[in-house]
Amino acid sequence: MKQAKTAGSIALLAGGLVFLCAGGLLGVLGALYILAAHSEDAARPGTDLGKGIGMLVAGLVVWTVAAVIGFLAWRRMQPKPEQKVTIHQEVELTGDIDLASLKCEKCAANLDKDAVAVKEGALLISCPYCGAAYQVVEEPKW
């Protein structure tokens, strides 16, 4: 994927360089036509003035296209900003569970909130004292 992105950026830069050269050529030729239209030695003074202005404007437009292509290539080569994802899970227990007096089923040690984890939608208890790990069984409210 990265090689395709780099190859595309290089192609954009090459296209921008071609447009830059073409715009420069049109601009120089337009300026020459404008200068030649005001020359006293010209066979028909003033007749090529419109052609020179048109070429000069076309050169500026092509330069603008080259600038846009260069900007797009530059943007394409920039790294994507990092996206941070935070997952927040809430568990709604249907039965009565008193977390304040939660005790390990194996060793009866008092457990704190760090011993409770949610994995794949199930409430799991891990006892830091005896190493027991088990799933909380909820008693129905009725």
Image (cartoon, rainbow, N blue to C red):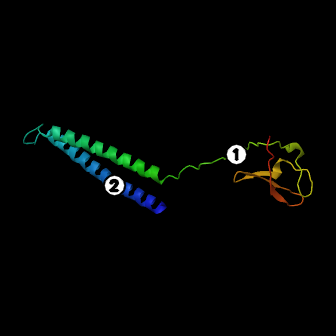
Secondary structure of the residue carrying numbered label 2: helix
Foreground pick, 54 / 133: 133
The percent coordinates of residue 126 (x first, y second) are: 82, 56
Which residue is pictured at 48% across the width and 60% down the height? 2
> Considering depth in this image, is 80 or 22 the residue closer to the camera?
80
123 shown above or below 130:
above
> In the drawing, what numbered circle is on residue 89?
1
Q: Is residue 115 left or right of residue 28?
A: right
Q: As drawn, is 28 to the left or to the right of 66? A: left
* Residue type, numbered disc 1: Gln
- Residues packed near mark 1 inside 10 Å, few (<14), some (14 to 19) or many (20 plus): few
Closest to the observer, 112 or 19: 112
**Residue 13 picture location, percent across and down:** 38, 55
Marks 2 and 1, Cα distance to the nearest angstrom?
50 Å
State the SS at label 1.
loop
| Residue underneath mark 2 | 15
Q: Is residue 26 visible?
A: yes
Q: Position of 103 compared to 49: left or right?
A: right
Classify residue 90 as left or right of residue 50: right
Residue at the image point whose x is 83% and y is 47% from the top = 113
Residue 129: mark: none
Residue at 80% from the left image edge and 43% from the top image edge: 95
Instruction: Note whether residue 38 is visible.
Output: no
Residue at 67%, 47% in the rendered image: 87
Picture quadrant of residue 64: top left
